[in-house]
Amino acid sequence: MRFIDIEGQAVTANHLTEIIDSGRISHAQMFLGDTIYGSLALAIAYAQYLNCEHREHYDNPEEHGGLHADSCGKCPQCMKYEQLSHSDLHLFFPTTTTASEKSKPCAAMFQKEFREFLASKKQRGTLDDWYDFLGVDNKQGLIRELDSDEIVKQLNLKSYEGFYKVVLLWMAEKMNAVTANKILKSLEEPESNTLIILVVENSEKMLSTIISRTQLVRIPRVSTGDSFMAGDIVLRHETQTEFGKLYVTWMRQLFKLNMASLSSWVEEVSAMGREMQKQFLLYSQESIRECFMCNNAGVPLLIDFGDEKFNKSFPAMITERNIEGLNEAFDNTIYAIERNAYAKIALMELSFKISKWLKKR
Ligand SMILES: [Zn+2]
């Protein structure tokens, strides 16, 4: 899977290739986000890019779906990744007993089925889709103790082909406590050139001891269809600069909660027209996410607000205590604007919510 094949996630893809190109690869990462929005596909594309022998870098991202870089898709490493047949890619996922496997299920038994499932759903199939694929009803799958033995073994073995070994756990929240505890030590001290990626949809179900040992990559919700592409806005440079100014002014007012200047700001944005309002809100939502990545995952801030002081200070305002709340507030407002809500009221309400969340940092 190349990044270009993953719809709507160019911003995240650019973060990921940046992490690899800068050589700051964490050996344990958690990709947090729904599989249908590409969390698993991004993890696989990330592993492929990591191993690609001829990574491509683009001077003209607008001609490459907004991407700054991607794997080549043609070298031997890429070819094996495209087929999901790379001997240094180890996939683990929830399993359950099926009609043919009646006892002690584990991921090793279902490797062929899982790859077929991934191919059939373009790596975006949900857990329910996977159970449907296996033909099991109402059974709860788990990543089991048998799997953790294998995971630990793989994390402690040198890579087979001399490239990066990637151990990928899809729906890692389906590990039970025994399994999770078994892999803890390996998360801390894996072999060199070995990477473990946990793809997680619900982090609340993960042990905090696991979360604290991983670097977080948050996968935003984007539409897999036509209209709504929050993760992938490609703006013209002038618009970006204009949005940056508006954004800095807005956030500063929200700190002071200066009602008079906030009102005139809302007037100004309300006059922009619905499509521009939506684009601005998408830009703002993406900015929040980038700031979070910068503050939390230590990646450099890729967005430039056009104000040095703000570039430096604002990311620290976005933490794991307010990112979800902020994201949801933007989602709701964008949804409302798309459905012709009265812009002034929607923007004012959003402003109060943001102000509240920023205080909770
Ligand atoms: Zn390649």
Image (spheres, rainbow, N blue to C red):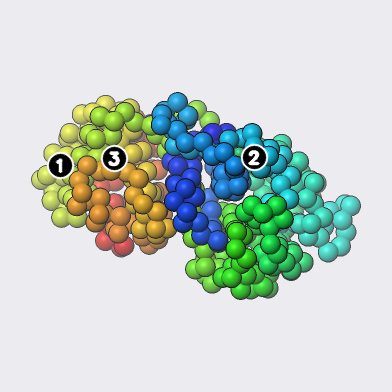
Q: Is residue 85 above or below residue 196?
A: above
Q: Is mark 3 within 8 Å of ligand 1?
A: no
Residue type at mark 2?
Answer: Cys
Mark nearer the N terminus (1 vs 3): 1
* Label 2 or label 1, whichever comes before in sequence order: 2
- Marks 2, 3: nearer the viewer: 2
Q: Residue 348: in sight, yes or no?
A: no
Sequence-first tag of 2 and 3:
2
Q: Residue at x 54, y 57 (%)?
A: 30
Q: Which SS class for mark 3? A: helix
Label 2, label 3: how far apart the Cα atoms are: 46 Å
Residue plotted at (44% across, 37% down)? 68
Q: Is the residue indicated by label 2 positioned so its CB lies within 8 Å of ligand 1?
A: yes
Placement of the C terminus among the 4 image quadrants:
bottom left
- The reply to whether residue 276 is in sight is yes
Image spot of residue 320 (x, y percent): 40, 60
Q: Which is nearer the eye, 195 or 145?
A: 195
From this viewpoint, which residue is outermost toward the left?
260
Residue type, mark 3 in image = Ala
**Displayed-image quarter of ligand 1:** top right
Which residue is disc 1 drawn over?
A: 263
Q: In the figure, is residue 207 to the left or right of 92?
A: left
Numbered circle sitting on residue 78: 2
Q: Could you say whether the residue bearing mark 1 is in a helix, strand or loop?
A: helix
Other residues around mark 2 within 10 Å, as few (<14) / some (14–19) / many (≥20): many
Q: Are marks 1 and 3 in contact (CB under 8 Å)?
A: no
* Label 1 packing within 10 angstroms: few (<14), some (14-19), many (20+): some
Q: Hey, what amino acid is under mark 1? A: Ser
Q: Which residue is mark 3?
A: 346
Q: Position of residue 344 (x, y in %)?
A: 23, 37
